[in-house]
Amino acid sequence: MAAGLEGGTSPDGLFTPALVIGANLPDLIDKPVGVFFPDLGLGTGRGLAHTLVFNLGLLAIGVYLYGHGRPWFLYVALASLGHLVLDEMWRLPRVLLWPFYGFSFPRVGRRGFMAQILAWWQALRTQPGVYGVEAAGAMLILVYLWRYLPYGGKLG
């Protein structure tokens, strides 16, 4: 194992929390947007944060910060790119390759807040593997925020 990464931490102590946050970042951004702004038609919960442009931007910022002694954002960016792979975003090229297919995202339909929540609840009950993992990831984020933010909230 690389020096300084034993026990899931890096020399700055933020390797694991950055990976957990980054792995969930696209959903942490896009799912609330789809729920609270149904007019955008993002019923899939996959919008800007699921695009290659957004994630390559994160990667560029991460490489820049890494070169200035702040590696945590690179971990976030790499984990966010991994999220795109695990979401099989190549199956939605209009989202992944946005804006090259146009500036709009695929419309799923206009649904209100409660309709979206009920649809996600139904999906959770019938496909627990889809949302169960995301719920576990969200819980891990809360644990890490509880653990690290009381100490000044410094992320690198």
Image (tube, rainbow, N blue to C red):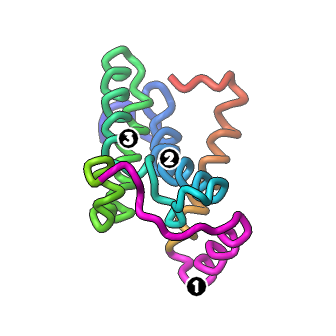
Q: Quadrant of residue 128?
A: bottom right
Q: Which residue is mark 1?
A: 126
Q: Which residues are magenta?
A: 102-129
Q: Which residue is mark 2?
A: 25
Q: Position of residue 83 (x, y in %)?
A: 39, 54
Q: Residue at x 68, y 31 (%)?
A: 149
Answer few, some or many: residues within 10 Å of disc 3's Cα (few below 14, many 20 plus, some between 14 and 19). Answer: many
Q: Position of residue 52 (x, y in %)?
A: 31, 47
Q: Position of residue 136 (x, y in %)?
A: 59, 61
Gap between marks 1 and 2 measured at Cα: 24 Å
| Dot 3 amino acid type | Phe
Which one is closest to the eye, mark 3 or mark 1? Answer: 3
Relative placement, left or right, of 30 versus 52 is right
Q: Provide the secondary structure element on which disc 3 rests.
A: helix
Looking at marks 3 and 1 on the same chain, the residue that comes earlier in the sequence is marked by 3
Pick whichever, 73 or 38, lies toward us. Answer: 38
| Dot 2 amino acid type | Leu
Gap between marks 3 and 1 measured at Cα: 31 Å
Quarter in which the N terminus is drawn: top left
Looking at marks 1 and 2 on the same chain, the residue that comes earlier in the sequence is marked by 2
| Dot 1 amino acid type | Thr
Which one is closest to the eye, mark 3 or mark 2? Answer: 3
